[in-house]
Amino acid sequence: MNGPTPPAATPTAAPTASTPASPSTPASPSAPADDEPAGDAEFASWPTATGEQAVSSTIEVKGVYDGSLKRFHGSGDLGGSGQDEGQDPMFKLADGATLKNVILGSPAADGVHCSGSCTLVNVWWEDVGEDAASFKGKSASAAYVVDGGGARKADDKVFQHNGAGTLTVKNFQVSDFGKLYRSCGNCGTQYERHVVIDNVLVTSPGKVIAGVNANYGDTATLSDVTIVGDSKKKIIVCERFKGNDSGDEPTALGSGPDGTSCVYETSEVTYQ
């Protein structure tokens, strides 16, 4: 968490959002935490919350929801922060919805779910629960965009791609994580999935930036990746798996650029 948590508001179930909650109100950025490097000038510092809102039931978003950089944290049924599968999300976005200027505090339950195409702009996860965001659209044309923001303290995955389509992650920062992106390795229904990762700041410790299923035609295209604090290069940039639809643990096939599933030049990865 960044600094002391303000007193929590009285927990209420937030209404369905079909229009912007309020005009965008940028917060004055705070200095990076001691374990969070400043990074390149193009990456924003972790923001200071403008307020606090407890969320006891999933916020359904249609259209645009602007959180004005308030910190949202789970309470009641959304008060869990473990790795149990099947938790409810803090925010559920309808097809075409946009979520922006939101800080997810702790506990964050299962973060954000996108039912179809969606856009997340300047969304920050201070302490990832099960996953930060899950993308569940069923159309190959589904397009998900994460632009700006950051996530830290993810024991497992940050972005979980269960559905079809293409996820673009850009101008994003992540630290202390398991996998930044994972195409579901053992979902009951499998799809061909694609991820584009561009201009990201990755801070150790971490395990994998992108994990894809080579046998389903997945691709991960990476560019302008900066990795901080990993002098031994233990963080895997892109890992290929043999996925399945039986629920079994997927088999790792290898890692590194192959021009087919893991598409990037080693020159696109910089170590600091």
Image: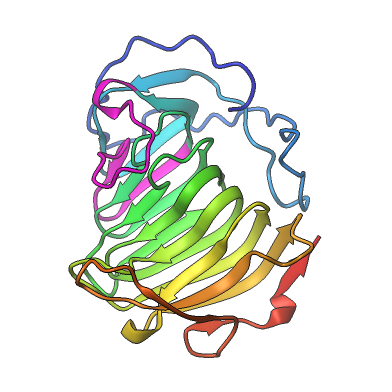
Quarter that holds the N terminus: top right
- Front in this rendered view, residue 142 or 235: 235
- Front in this rendered view, residue 253 or 87: 253
* Image-based side of 251 in relation to 162, left or right: right
* Image-based side of 126 in relation to 53, left or right: right
Q: Please give the count of numbered marks on the rendered protein.
A: 0
- x, y percent for residue 98: 37, 47
First to last magenta residue range: 75-101
The relative height of residue 105 versus residue 247 in the rendered view (above or below) is: above
Quarter that holds the C terminus: bottom right
Q: Residue at x 76, y 50 (%)?
A: 39
The relative height of residue 129 versus residue 248 in the rendered view (above or below) is: above
Q: Residue at x 78, y 50 (%)?
A: 41
Coloring scheme used: rainbow
The relative height of residue 271 versus residue 94 in the rendered view (above or below) is: below
- x, y percent for residue 84: 30, 43
Specify the quadrant of the image occupied by residue 75.
top left
Q: Residue at x 74, y 59 (%)?
A: 230
- x, y percent for residue 166: 38, 70
The relative height of residue 147 versus residue 92 in the rendered view (above or below) is: below
- Front in this rendered view, residue 29 or 18: 29
Specify the quadrant of the image occupied by residue 53.
top left
- x, y percent for residue 143: 36, 66
- Front in this rendered view, residue 25 or 84: 84
* Image-based side of 22 in relation to 175, left or right: left
Answer whether residue 88 is magenta in the image.
yes
Answer whether residue 164 is magenta in the image.
no
